[in-house]
Amino acid sequence: MAQYSAQLDDVFVALADPTRRAVVRRLGHAPTSVGDLAREFPMTLPSFMKHVRTLESSGLIRTVKHGRVRTCVLNRERLSLVDDWLADQRRIWEERTDRLEEFVTDERNEP
Amino acid sequence: MAQYSAQLDDVFVALADPTRRAVVRRLGHAPTSVGDLAREFPMTLPSFMKHVRTLESSGLIRTVKHGRVRTCVLNRERLSLVDDWLADQRRIWEERTDRLEEFVTDERNEP
DNA sequence: CCAATAGTTAGCCCTTGCGCTAACTGTTGG
DNA sequence: CCAACAGTTAGCGCAAGGGCTAACTATTGG
């Protein structure tokens, strides 16, 4: 628990786009070249590359260029940042197993 | 596993900002009024309100107005969308306990 | 060797995001 | 009742995001 903030920003931002989430999902199956990936999305290669760069600089994927082919690989470990954040969040609210829920549900029904 | 996409977008986008994550964390402790929350961040009330609205429309928080005070409450349940997405992702890559890692680590060391 | 292939770079457009100020509405304590 | 308070609305400025085209580089199969 520290100043992950910048890294978390990058990871959440990266995941906040459906194309990029789809890429992550896709790479969960197997490493894939940029071209093969791009072919599955309705956009041009340069546009798609921006997503790849965003994912890479967030650390969610790594890429290696071999000859003229760039292969993308998922970096499973990076997703644990999200996991940790969720766990921390859960820890916080479990410290207070109060009736916070009811608190609002009550007010809500009053004018 | 379906077309949560739009909802996931909203949630991830909401979490992709440090101010909003801080609000979520803060609300993990207790429901809080907009004014009390805003006082902890270096921005004006109207600016802060936009974050509140973003969080609210993502479903991560709910708000109730009582008199002239609007109180924000965390909606714990909504975070499970993220949780589910993570779990699904994990499920995918666990189907393939291959040597994907090595795959790349190898290529990497070659010219 | 050279045409095709795979990716890259540069630059443009438009929309959205996030901050601000100013001025307004609705509630309330005294 | 009215001044102070809590939030809201409107509108503005600027930077960033996500898409595009055009033109370029670097590899490679034949």
Image (cartoon, coloured by chain):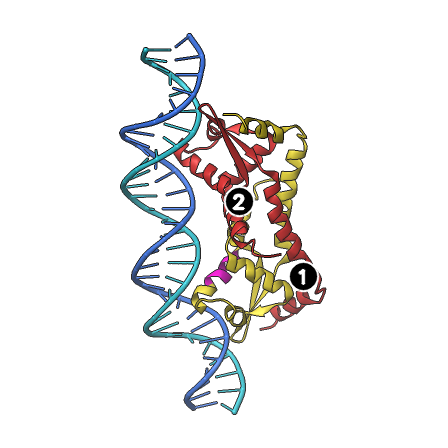
Chain colours: A yellow, B red, C blue, D cyan
Q: Secondary structure at mark 2?
A: helix
Relative to A38, residue A21 above or below: above
Q: Nearer the viewer, residue C8 or B86?
A: B86
Give me the residue at 47% from left, 41% from top: B54
- Residue A6: percent from the left, percent from the top? 52, 46
- Residue D17: percent from the left, percent from the top? 44, 54
- Residue A88: percent from the left, percent from the top? 64, 40
Q: Magenta span covers which residues?
A: A50-57
Q: Quadrant of the C terminus of chain B?
A: bottom right
* Residue type highlighted by circle 1: Trp
Cα separation between marks 2 and 1? 24 Å
- Residue A54: percent from the left, percent from the top? 49, 57
Circle 2 residues within 10 Å: few <14, some 14–19, many ≥20: many
Give me the residue at 55% from left, 61% from top: A22
Circle number at residue B93: 1
Q: Is residue A82 visible?
A: no
